[in-house]
Amino acid sequence: MTQEPEDLISVEIEIDLEDIVPGYLENRRRELGVLNQALAGGDFETIRRLGHDLKGTGGGYGFDALSELGRALEQAGREADPAAAGRTIAQIKDFLARVRVSFV
Amino acid sequence: MSEEILIVDDSADSRSLLAVILKRVGYAVRQAPDGPTALEMVAQAAPHLILLDVNMPGWDGFTVCARLKAHSAWAEIPVIFVSARDEAADKVRGLEIGGADYITKPFDKAEVLARVRSHLKISALTHELRQKNQELSRKQADLEEDLRAAAAIQASLLPQKLPNTPQVELSWEFVPCQTLGGDIFHALELDEGWLGLYILDVSGHGVPSSLVTVSIHETLLPHSGVVVREAAEDGRPLSLASPLQVARELDRLYPLERFEKTFSIVYAVLDMSSGRFSYVNAGHPPPLLLRADGGRELLRSTGPLIGLDGMLPFEEAQCQLRPGDRILLYTDGVTDLQDRDGGFLGEGPFLEFVEQVRRLPLAAGLRGLRQMMADYAGGAAPQDDISLLGLAYWGDARR
């Protein structure tokens, strides 16, 4: 079967970014560990900063959803809200697991 | 397109993204992960534009920008802030410390490119404008140098050596205006016992007026055939033209159409032994005849300006000089002299100045007049040339 599983998220990105997008997503997956560690340690400043960065880069790379999640994460960090931060980190992890990029 | 853009951002992902976007359309790109590195790179080779993140560890973008702007060599490099901080206050601050623009992340690629392009263009045009201004300043300096040189040439035509006769004493003062003026005067012995003298003022200022002045000066030299002629008339010695003939000839030689200039002139011939002073005053301020007994006469205009094609006839007038009498010729730079408040000296006050110096020796009197006028102008350079030509007639009294 060539049909995509329903739970995958398809994102089309300009071919120009083909070289840098895989690395970008890989960096985000690696960042999940840092985020979870920060959450466990109550380091909301790191959560705020990484959320801020994610907000800034996500949309530029073509992942508007990541910018939105970054915005939520930055706010959770600023408000030192562990529940919201945990929820958002889980959403980021879920997005990264399901995203499939095709370059056009 | 070979403009170089420096991307300053602590996030490698952000730098990579901007670098790809910019390189794709042909820009050269360098990257710095922090402020100090950025300043080092700028010092090595200034980029055409800087994209600068705000949130960075160590120096933030505002600090980096302020340091760049404090450096005169780098202050003109356009800086565009690129930041996920989207508060209006951040944008205002960025622009206030010298940023050219502020783009919020996440950004639209087309918007980034459009802003980069427009600021590169503004920067290039500004640079070009500055160069053109420098070029203009240089040209202006050259022109001013030429004007000074022309003024020196014009001044060199003023009488270097005046006729030295027992019957007549001559002296002059000349104060050039800031720009080139149109005054000139001369006195020379045309023939044994005959003195010719003139003072003239060509309309306008600057190089054209000055060149016309030089031309008229040449025309009035004895060898050019205008003031010294072959034919005999009016009982004068064979070779001398009368003031009336000189005025008519000048009017023929210098019609308005020729140089778009008119001029006023007093041309006079003095029979040094008899004291007979014949003159034409073509629209010129009236020479003063200062009698030895204290009387004063104004030798008013006897004809129109030269160059109006004989619109009105010229007339010649005479007066009889007696030992101790003086003639003072001057140009309207004297009466039009302005004080610091823009007021004009005028004829009345000038005549009062003259009364104060008329008993002094001729040269000292003219120097005194010059000083009084300088005091009146309050140290400012005159708007027009100031020319004073004085003649003291002694006849045979000093023989």
Image: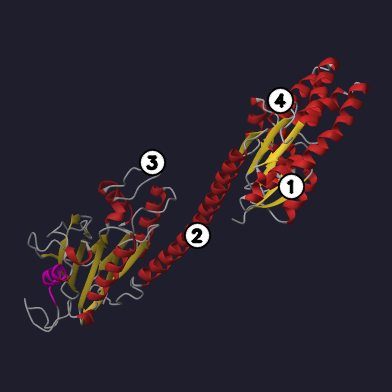
Where residue B253 sits, quadrant-wise, is: bottom left
Have a look at marks 2 and 3 and say if they share a chain. Answer: yes
Residue annotated with mark 1 = A19
Q: Nearer the viewer, mark 2 or mark 3?
A: 2
The chain identifier of the residue carrying mark 2 reads B
| Image quadrant occupied by the N terminus of chain B | bottom right
In the rendered image, residue B241, in percent from the top left (x then y), is placed at 13, 76
The residue under the point 23% across, 68% down is B198
CB under 8 Å between callouts 2 and 3? no
Q: Can you tell which mark lies on residue B341?
A: 3
Magenta segment:
B241-252
Query: How much space separates mark 2 and mark 1, taking CA atoms?
Result: 48 Å
Q: Is residue B214 left or right of residue B245?
A: right
Q: Nearer the viewer, mark 4 or mark 3?
A: 4
Q: Amino acid at mark 4?
A: Glu
Q: Can you tell which mark lies on residue B135?
A: 2
In the rendered image, residue B285, in percent from the top left (x then y), is placed at 22, 56
Badge 1 crowding class, 10 Å Cα cut-off, few under 14, some 14 to 19, many 20 or more, is: few
Q: Amino acid at mark 3?
A: Asp
Residue annotated with mark 4 = A68
Badge 3 crowding class, 10 Å Cα cut-off, few under 14, some 14 to 19, many 20 or more, is: few
* Disc nearer the start of the sequence (2/3): 2
Have a look at marks 2 and 4 and say if they share a chain. Answer: no
Have a look at marks 3 and 1 and say if they share a chain. Answer: no
